[in-house]
């Protein structure tokens, strides 16, 4: 029996020179998340617990675009999207446009476990989190000076930015895992795009678009221009190519990114693992912060 845990910290036009001073901080952040989730898998814990734990670790790290340190909306606010899914019963939970909760992935997990619903939005999601006993923090908890500067720049050009395509390199986060019992799970969390307007929701909280887990095929977490991932149902597409098309994980992941997403002129990537422990992390952007941990091995982390 083996376990596998993959994490990502976002994809984009990552510039080698510009990130050089922060390279170690990113790699250490990915490694820390792998170790946090890996401890659960090592003890025989579930893939669902492991992906939640890994994503919490990344949400708490202000260098990534999720939880603390998330990018700012057009109005200078932080609106968080997250989702989580397990592959045995295909249960899922998600939140979007959530404010003032430190770990949206845990709120999503709570939706999965404690509610009759899959996706809760904005004020309703916050009310649910409050009712479930989540601590509410002030806006100040999430803000960093870098994010303010990033928004000011975006406002000047009136464009939205994928986090890693702006000068400051941070990113959406995600994790997928196979546990010792052979179950799969996936989780994704993000602040979305810098300068997003009008309650924009990306792919990350949408089951099938940014996140998918099905023991019959694979577990997937995506990152990139959410609008394209929604139009392609990318995470589900990878599973469907395996389940209905008999594709290998590698071919399915490559087709979803290099054909489907690429044909729409969008960039991004995904991490995916199947029940045999095969894994794949394709991207069509310059880089993707990513890492893998397998039973009996040291964590491996990469950007390019
Ligand atoms: N997919 C995310 C979104 O569109 C952004 C990202 O992956 O960085 O909200």
Image (cartoon, rainbow, N blue to C red):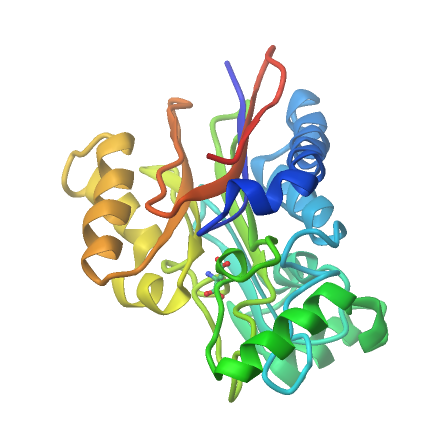
Q: At which x and y percent is residue 209? A: 37, 60
In the image: residue 211, left or right of residue 34? left
Q: Is residue 142 visible?
A: yes
User: Which image quadrant for residue 251?
Assistant: top left
Q: 220 or 154, which lies in front?
A: 154
**Residue furthest top as drawn:** 296
User: Which image quadrant for residue 252?
Assistant: top left
Q: 171 or 136, which lies in front?
A: 171
Q: At which x and y percent is residue 293? A: 57, 24
**Residue furthest left as drawn:** 245
Q: Please give the name of the residue rendered at 16% of the width and 43% of the height, measured from the top-left corner.
A: 244
Q: Please give the name of the residue rendered at 18% of the width and 57% of the height, measured from the top-left corner.
A: 263
Q: At which x and y percent is residue 276? A: 38, 22
Q: 70 or 294, which lies in front?
A: 70
Say above or below: 287 vs 182.
below
In the image: residue 168, left or right of residue 102? left
In the image: residue 172, left or right of residue 22? left
User: Which image quadrant for residue 70?
Assistant: bottom right
Q: 283 or 113, which lies in front?
A: 283
Say above or below: 236 vs 190.
above
Q: At which x and y percent is residue 47? A: 57, 36
Say above or below: 201 vs 168.
below
Say above or below: 289 vs 199.
above
In the image: residue 27, left or right of residue 215? right
Q: Please give the name of the residue rendered at 64% of the width and 27% of the height, measured from the top-left corner.
A: 41
């Amino acid at each position: 029996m083996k376990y596998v845990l993959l994490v990502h910290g976002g994809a984009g036009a990552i510039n080698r020179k510009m990130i050089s001073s922060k390279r170690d901080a990113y790699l250490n952040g990915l490694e820390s998340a792998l170790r946090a989730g890996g401890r659960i898998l090592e003890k025989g814990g579930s893939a669902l617990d492991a992906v939640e734990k890994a994503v919490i670790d990344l949400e708490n790290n202000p260098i990534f675009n999720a939880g603390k340190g998330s990018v700012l909306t057009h109005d200078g606010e932080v609106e968080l999207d997250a989702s989580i899914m397990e592959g045995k019963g295909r249960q899922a939970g998600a939140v979007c446009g959530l404010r003032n909760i430190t770990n949206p992935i845990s709120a999503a997990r709570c939706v999965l476990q404690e509610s009759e619903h899959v996706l809760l939005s904005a004020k309703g999601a916050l009310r649910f989190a409050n009712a479930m006993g989540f601590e509410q923090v002030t806006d100040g908890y999430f803000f960093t000076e870098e994010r303010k500067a990033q928004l000011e720049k975006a406002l000047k050009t009136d464009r939205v930015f994928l986090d890693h395509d702006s000068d400051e390199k941070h990113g959406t986060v995600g994790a997928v895992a196979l546990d010792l019992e052979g179950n799969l799970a996936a989780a994704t969390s993000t602040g979305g795009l810098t300068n997003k307007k009008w309650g924009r929701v990306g792919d990350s909280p949408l089951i099938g678009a940014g996140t998918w887990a099905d023991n019959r095929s694979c577990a997937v977490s995506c990152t990139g221009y959410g609008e394209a991932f929604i139009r392609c149902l990318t995470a589900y597409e990878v599973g469907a190519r395996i389940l209905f098309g008999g594709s290998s994980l590698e071919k399915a992941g490559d087709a979803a990114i290099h054909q489907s997403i690429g044909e729409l002129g969008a960039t991004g990537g995904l991490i995916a693992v199947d029940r045999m422990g095969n894994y794949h992390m394709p991207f069509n952007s310059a880089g993707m912060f990513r890492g893998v941990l397998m039973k009996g091995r040291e964590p491996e982390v990469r950007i390019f």
